[in-house]
Image (tube, rainbow, N blue to C red):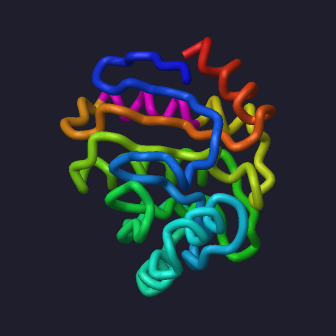
Amino acid sequence: MEAKKLKNIVVEIARGDISSVKAGAIVNAANNGLWMGAGVAGALKLRGGTQIEREAVAKGPVRVGQAVETGAGKLDAKYVIHAAVMGQDLKTDAGSIALAAWNALAAAERLRVDSVAMPALGTGVGGFPVKSCARILFETVKKFDETAPVYVKRVIFVLYTKKAFDDFEGCFRMV
């Protein structure tokens, strides 16, 4: 795991299964209907329990870019923050990813959690390029850090594949 300190937040990158990470909140790369299918959502539902999806769907649908929280079920977290990076067509873009990431961080701050685990939003089912996602997410965290968050002190980007980790690591060195 690599770490870099910004003004208020320590940013880390790690390779692994986000559903096994201990954090105040885990971000789910969600669709705007908030139903949990494959990828990150599927892993979170499998390990954390179907109650996460039931609670999420009850709060949806939401606009693409919004983020809503649910309990974390059996996960080692207090909350799952469902960041809607795509609509029902399962397509995403840079603006949607940036807005959803910002709103996920803002939700974590509102929930008073100190650590947030976040996947490469929109790169699985959404098909967005990982390197572009890495740049967007690092830039979003840097901008969020400038707002002087009181509670969020650590953001961990958790990447499942070696290629995704390597792409994030390349961008990480330039942050």
Q: Residue at x 58, y 32 (%)?
A: 14
Number of numbered discs visible in the structure rendering:
0
* Residue 139 in the image, given as x and y percentages of width and height: 52, 29
* Residue 156 in the image, given as x and y percentages of width and height: 48, 36
Magenta stretch? Answer: 137-146
Q: Does the magenta stretch include residue 7?
A: no
> What's the magenta bit mostly, secondary-structure-wise?
helix
Relative to 74, residue 139 above or below? above
Q: Name, please, the residue furthest toward the top.
A: 173
Relative to 34, residue 94 above or below? above
Instruction: Tell me: 94 left or right of 90.
Output: left
Give residue 114's quadrant in the image: top left
Q: Which residue is drawn at 24% across and 30% down?
A: 148
| Quarter the C terminus occupies | top right
Instruction: Tell me: 11 left or right of 149.
Output: right
Q: Nearer the viewer, residue 46 or 79?
A: 46
Q: Nearer the viewer, residue 99 or 129?
A: 129
Relative to 173, residue 47 above or below? below
Q: Which of 91 and 52 is in front in this view?
A: 52
* Residue 73 in the image, given as x and y percentages of width and height: 41, 71
Give residue 166's quadrant in the image: top right
Instruction: Tell me: 111 left or right of 131.
Output: left
| Quarter the N terminus occupies | top right
Q: Which residue is drawn at 45% across and 81% down?
A: 51
Q: Residue at x 36, y 70 (%)?
A: 71
* Residue 24 in the image, given as x and y percentages of width and height: 33, 49
